[in-house]
Amino acid sequence: MERGSFFTLICFLLLVFSHLEFSQEAHVLAVGGLVSDGQTLVSALQTFELGFFSPGKSRNRYLGIWYKNSPEAVVWVANRNNPIADRNGILTVSDSGNLVLLNRTKSVVWSSNVSGTAKPPVAVARLLDTGNLVLKDNKSKPESYLWESFDSPSDTLLAGMKIGWNLKTGEERYLTSWRSVDDPSPGNFTYRLDITGLPQLVIGRGLKKMYRTGPWNGIGFGAVPAVPDLVFKPTVISNENEIYYTFKTVGDTINMRLRLNQSGYLQRLLSDRGSDRWGVLYSVPFDQCGSYGFCGANSVCSTRRPDTCKCIQGFIPESQWSTNCVRESSLDCQKGEGFLRLVGVKVPDLSKLYSNENLNPEQCAAECLKNCSCTAYANLSVSDGHTSCLMWFGDLVDISEVSEVYRGEDVFIRLPSSSLVLPGDSSTRNRLTVIILVSIISGLIILGLVVFIIWRKSRKRDQSLYLTRLEGGKDESEVPLFDLSSIEIATDNFSFRNLIGKGGFGPVYKGNLPTGQEIAVKRLSKDSGQGVEQFTNEVVLIAKLQHRNLVGLLGCCIQGEERMLIYEYMPNKSLDCLIFDHKRRAQLSWKNRFDIVLGIARGLLYLHQDSKLQIIHRDLKVSNILLGSNYIPKISDFGLARIIGGNDEETTTSRVVGTYGYMAPEYAVDGTFSVKSDVFSFGVVLLEIVSGKRNRGYNHPDHRNNLLGHAWLLWNEDRALELMDTVLEESCVKSEVLRFIHVGLLCVQESPEDRPPMSSVLVKLTNEEATLPPPKQPGFFIQREPGDSFSAIRTTTMLTENEVTISVLEAR
């Protein structure tokens, strides 16, 4: 062998043996070994992987740990503040026994920075199946580490990790959100263990609290979903050395992580072991009452009431502009005082608190009465039959009602005797009040039934007369009548192969008349939630409306029990069949969607302003937009529409009808509707057309908002274009997309007064020079549907392909 070849072989063998330890144990990195960009360490059971990655759209490189089956689920980042600009990063164990991250110039970007580490070749780094990257001395005990990643959390808490305080050194471990999906550097939000009084967990933004749990009671935190111990067990450990929160999963069939996202939401996520799909067990803040101090001081927040914020009994609003409440009468220790009991609530914040574990409920109440500064008390069960007496001083902040699935406590509010109703003095009066109320309610029910029966008989008589006129062909609407036999022939006796859709009214069939004209036959189902009223309403309205963007009614069929509407046939079906279909949505280019939006807007403007009758549709949604040839949109389904007088700005109904996800808030909650209700629905439709996503049932990994809330968040972060359907990237005009999103957000603003009329909407959509005001927060910002489903916990979101019109009856 030549001398040069022999030397080359020796160098190659030395290179192989220098990396032998790394190749033998893929989860171990020894002194001198390295992980370069493109290589990874994988934990022994293939659960976690360590390597280099680029988050989102960023080109920077970071060293991180993620679930091997879910590379997008990054749980730890080393160089959060010092990204590497290229793919020349290297992780190695230095000669001093430290883990170091080097860039192209071999400069240290990040280090475990442990002083007095072991001498080589003893120090090694291991990636454990818990997700913990550890640096250890092989001669020491198995769980004795020189350094571990669990001591430096990023935005994720894994089972076995701790957040809390080292009481000897004053060191605190806590989660910090990413700055954005593209930037893992520390963001605006933190998640920490607050040890003022009893421990509680707090999401903060700087020094400002954004959300908090209730206090730890030995089993769990208050006002947090009471998840069965069969899933995971939370724990707070408190001793002379440290106080911290941790959790462990039960069994080995699931993965669980607690993640603080860049928007300040905390999500507990679950996945079947080995799966790449994650479900949201719960997310906080769950609603507006979860936002810290949403209702101000001395007030109780509840999403179950129309008035979300309500002063505690004995308190009144501080002013008409303030959310704070103040005492109606001052406390006076000398004149006798008592307590008002709030049942099952999230207890007030613990910032001004006294705690004593040795007092029972009676002693706790007596102790509070002794101190004239005590404003409230509670007696918490903290484990093993022990209780803890909590007493508050000063204003009571962040109280909210909680549902049965959350852990609530009873809080006793101190009030002067003038603000209390003593049970002994009121028993007779209470019984009398109950008797009077029962009598009044019973009488009203009987009277209501009588009136209802008379009204129904009258209404049926009127409908029968009207249908008789239609059958005779003498109604002023002059709607052509088709006989049943001709419709049966046209639809091949309502053959299943001619079935083209089904909605709240009933099935819809395609048919062919003897003349060759194609028709769509809408057949009223006997089991339909709609009835003769909606049928006659649609006949009268559509017969009198003529517009290019309204569906054309060719006639109707009334024979025996059959009620059918015959429309012009729309070859491209309804809009939802395209934009919500993963494959077919690509058929609609930006130009198509632009024209569809304008067509819908013109049709609504005609209904609201230009027709002889001013009409509110009340059920505008994508499934009620039919597409003719060349995708010309036509508004259909006028069964729920209402004619209003030209001067009627608002009308109130006791029968709320429509489809969830499209109804305006003032209509869904109060039954008040106007042309601005249709504007809200139009805004939802517009944002759905731009995004290709449904508002109802929309899911996002970073928050629990619906599509409207997601669009609002993106708009405020100057990232509105991210809402656009990805299939439009090549065909879109970005300025038009941004203008459409802007107009959509203006249409879905919470207050009807803030929404523009359709005349203004059309101008804003078509005129690039039009000045658009900034939108305000949309109505129905929070979507409360649970997330995905998984085997450990079944949390199912009920969605249907064909949305069904609902009818909610409410007494008013």
Image: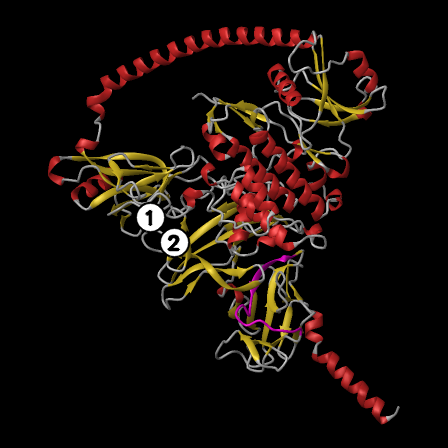
Quarter occupied by residue 43: bottom right
**Residue pointed to by mark 1:** 349
Q: Residues within 10 Å of mark 1 (few under 14, many from 20)?
A: many
Q: Is residue 429 visible?
A: yes
Task: Classify mark 2: helix, strand or loop.
Answer: strand
Q: Observer-nearest residue: 383 or 179?
A: 179
- Range drawn in magenta: 71-87
Q: Observer-nearest residue: 725 or 243?
A: 725
Residue drawn at 86 percent across, 19 percent down: 514
**Residue pointed to by mark 2:** 209
Q: Are marks 2 and 1 in contact (CB under 8 Å)?
A: yes
Quarter occupied by residue 107: bottom right
Query: Residue 255, position in %: x, y?
Result: 60, 51
308 left or right, relative to 775: left
Closer to the chain start, of discs 2 and 1, is 2
Q: Quadrant of the N terminus?
A: bottom right
